[in-house]
Structure formats: C-alpha cells, structure tokens
Image: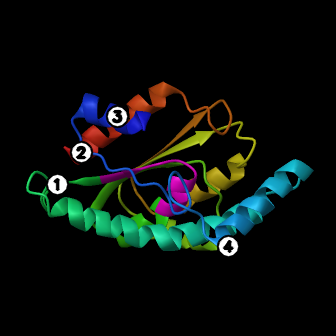
C-alpha cells in the first residue's frame, strides 16, 4: 500500500490494488488452506518450498487474472479514467506471479515492474510473450526465492527495453529508492 500511496501522491497516478484470492480479507478455500499448511510445514522442516509455492501461485493467478481484467474494464468505464489512460502493472513475488500471465494477455498494460518470483514453465512462456518495457527488482540475498529464479524470469522477457535492478538484501528488503526508481519508470512510460 505504501507504493500505491507514493504513486498517487508523488506521480498523480490512479492506482488500483486488489488482494489476491485467499489474501487480506479474502477467505481461503480448502485447497488454499492445504497449500498454506504444506508451505508452513516445509518451512518448519527446512525443506524447499519451490514446488508448493509454484503450484499455489499458479492457482492464484488463474483466479486473479480474470479479476484484474474485470477491474480494468470497470476503471475504463469511469469518466475520469476512460479508455485512453495508459496502464501499468507493478508488484513483487505473488503480484509478479499474477502479473506476468496477466500482462502476457492484456494489451492495455503498456509498462510493468516485476520482481522476485519463482520461475516455471508457464511463467517463462508468458514472459516470452511480453514485449512492453519492463523493470525487474531482484533482492540479491532473498532467502526464499533464489536469484537464479529471478535471473531466469528476467531473461525470459521478450522486451527490448528491460532493466534488472539487483539490490542487496532479503525477501522483503527492497530499498525505498527502488520504489522511487519504479515511479520514474512509470512516469517515463505512462505519461
């Protein structure tokens, strides 16, 4: 929410933020609960979480992508936004897992900021269809998602204009100046 607030107050953008299915105030379904339990058990046992997170994120993306497309439709119906307003997409980790397949099929999105996400066949295939300008944030010392995942996903984007911002730190340690860099990226591509 801090990023959304910054984009609104500093850049004057209209911003929409949606909790993913089973996140925030949205209830989890039974399958979501199974994934969350498996994730917690794997973390507690010191086991890899990649496969669990990838399966869970694929399910979340299948449900969230249609919601985002409906949200774009609703926003475009507002007279203060309309159909001519440029659209950007930004988000890390789960938001990247949702945003990559969304951006691959949504022509209204003209610039995107992604980061720190697991790579898997469906994500790689979707990234290969994305040709818009991309900025990719990579926490170099992420304890949950290896940098190899981030580098592979970045490499998969077909965009001719893409930048990789690797920063020291862990999973939730992207410095604020990268939020400001993302704001400048969106100002450059959405104005």
Q: Distance between the residues labelled 2 and 4?
A: 34 Å
Check the image and name the residue furthest to the right: 45
Horizontal and vertical percent position of residue 170? 68, 35
Q: Quadrant of residue 69?
A: bottom left
In the picture of the structure, the residue carrying the numbered disc 2 is 14
Instruction: Please say whether residue 116 is visible from this viewpoint.
Output: yes
Q: Which mark is residue 85?
A: 1
Q: Earlier in the sequence, mark 1 or mark 2?
A: 2
Is 180 left, or right, of 109 in this rendering? right
Q: In which quarter of the image is residue 153?
A: bottom right
Which residues make up the magenta segment?
88-98
Q: Distance between the residues labelled 1 and 2?
A: 10 Å
In the picture of the structure, the residue carrying the numbered disc 4 is 31
In the picture of the structure, the residue carrying the numbered disc 3 is 5
Residue at position x 65%, y 30% in the image: 168
Q: How crowded is mark 4: few (under 14 residues within 10 Å), some or many (20 or more)?
A: few
Q: Do the residues labelled 1 and 2 touch (CB within 8 Å)?
A: yes
């Amino acid at each position: 929410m801090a990023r959304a607030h910054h984009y609104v107050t500093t850049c004057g953008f209209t911003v929409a933020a949606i909790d993913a299915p089973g996140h925030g105030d949205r209830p989890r379904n039974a399958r979501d609960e199974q994934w969350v339990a498996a994730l917690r058990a794997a973390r507690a046992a010191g086991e890899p979480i990649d496969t669990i997170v990838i399966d869970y994120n694929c399910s979340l993306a299948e449900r969230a992508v249609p919601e985002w497309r409906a949200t774009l439709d609703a926003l475009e119906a507002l007279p203060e936004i309309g159909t001519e307003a440029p659209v950007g997409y930004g988000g890390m980790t789960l938001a990247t897992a949702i945003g990559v397949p969304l951006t691959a099929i949504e022509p209204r999105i003209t610039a995107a900021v992604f980061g720190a996400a697991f790579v898997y066949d469906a994500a790689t295939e979707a990234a290969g269809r994305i040709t818009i300008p991309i900025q990719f944030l990579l926490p170099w010392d992420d304890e949950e998602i290896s940098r190899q995942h981030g580098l592979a996903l970045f490499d998969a984007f077909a965009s001719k204009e893409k930048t990789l911002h690797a920063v020291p730190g862990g999973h939730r340690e992207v410095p604020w100046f990268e939020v400001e860099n993302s704001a400048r990226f969106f100002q450059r591509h959405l104005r």
